[in-house]
Image: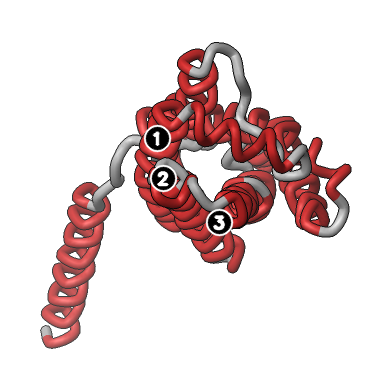
Amino acid sequence: MHRTNDAAVGTAAAESQHSASSTGARRAPAGPPLPPLAIVVVALSMASIVLPTVLAGGATYPSPFGDGDAIVAYFREHELSVLIAALLQFAASVPLAIFAAAATTRLTQLGVRAPGVSIGFAGGIIAAASMALSAGFSWALTRPELLEEPGIVRLLHDLAFFAGGPGFIVPLGLLIAGLAVPGLLAGLLPRWHAWAGLVLAGLAMVATLVVAIPELAVLLPIVRFPSFAWIVLCAFLLPLRRADVARPARNRSDATSEPRS
């Protein structure tokens, strides 16, 4: 009699625990949707490049490795363009930080417990902070009293380039690697997409050398624009639930292991 009661109590407790865990799983917050965040980041980033160029009559943002007089003249003649670029760049840094937090949290909810998730989150936050810092230096270049000092203009321009160039691209590579590696190993992303991310992450690491080898500055746009496309695709491809992940190999294995009648 006691054994029957104990068994009944144990069964009820197990069912209660299973029900609670199922309810918790259903109520687990999925976080903000990734596609809108990624699209906003890319749209604002591209607008910060294209719109100021249009407003400046086709004059492009100067390279810090160019002629010093031409650099100073650009900022003195195109204050509005520089201001708009800074505002759009700063605006893009906010959804980038949110995307990094939401995407890495999504990996955790999908069962990924590898250190790469934390690395990706750190990379995304550093990239967003660098973007905001670059925007701040660019905004300072619109101040009339600072434009009267060529030395200060060159200093602020160099800092804006470093923060928005290698200072942004390198940690962005960490974010992509932090998403691509778990996506590849856990089968959460298509293999071609994950491997493309690893290639971009590798090139981003090489971009660290831009500060010592100016000729490698060509890597910055080569990595930047494909990385934007990769992030948008990742936002659409990363599954919302583990059950959405296709497991063709496992299904075939299960099928062949079934007893034959």
Identify the residue under disc 1. Answer: 83
Label 1: element kind:
helix
Which amino acid type is marked by label 2? Answer: Trp
Q: Closest to the observer: 76 or 84?
A: 76
Is any part of residue 46 visible from this angle? Answer: yes
Which residue is depicted at the point 62% across and 51% down? 154
Dot 2 alpha-carbon crowd within 10 angstroms: few under 14, some 14 to 19, many 20 or more: many
Q: Residue at x 68, y 42 (%)?
A: 257
Q: Residue at x 55, y 28 (%)?
A: 233
Residue type, label 1: Leu
Instruction: Give the residue pinned by disc 3.
Output: 152
Image spot of residue 186 (x, y percent):
62, 49
* Residue 51 position in % (x across, y down): 46, 19
Residue highlighted by disc 2? 139
Q: Which quarter of the image is occupied by the C terminus?
A: top right
Report the front residue among 167 and 179: 167
Residue appearing at x 76%, y 38% in the figure: 67
Q: Is disc 2 placed on a helix, strand or loop? A: helix
* Tag 3: amino acid: Ile
Quote the CA–CA distance across marks 2 and 3.
Answer: 13 Å
- Separation (CA) of disc 1 from disc 2: 6 Å
Mark 1 surroundings: few (<14), some (14-19) or many (≥20) residues within 10 A: many
Crowding at dot 3, Cα within 10 Å, few <14 / some 14-19 / many 20+, comes out as some
1 or 3: tag closer to the N-terminus? 1
Q: Position of residue 42 (x, y in %)?
A: 48, 29
Query: Vertically, is 141 above or below 46?
Result: below
The answer to which image quadrant residue 251 occupies is top right
Scheme by which the image is coloured:
secondary structure
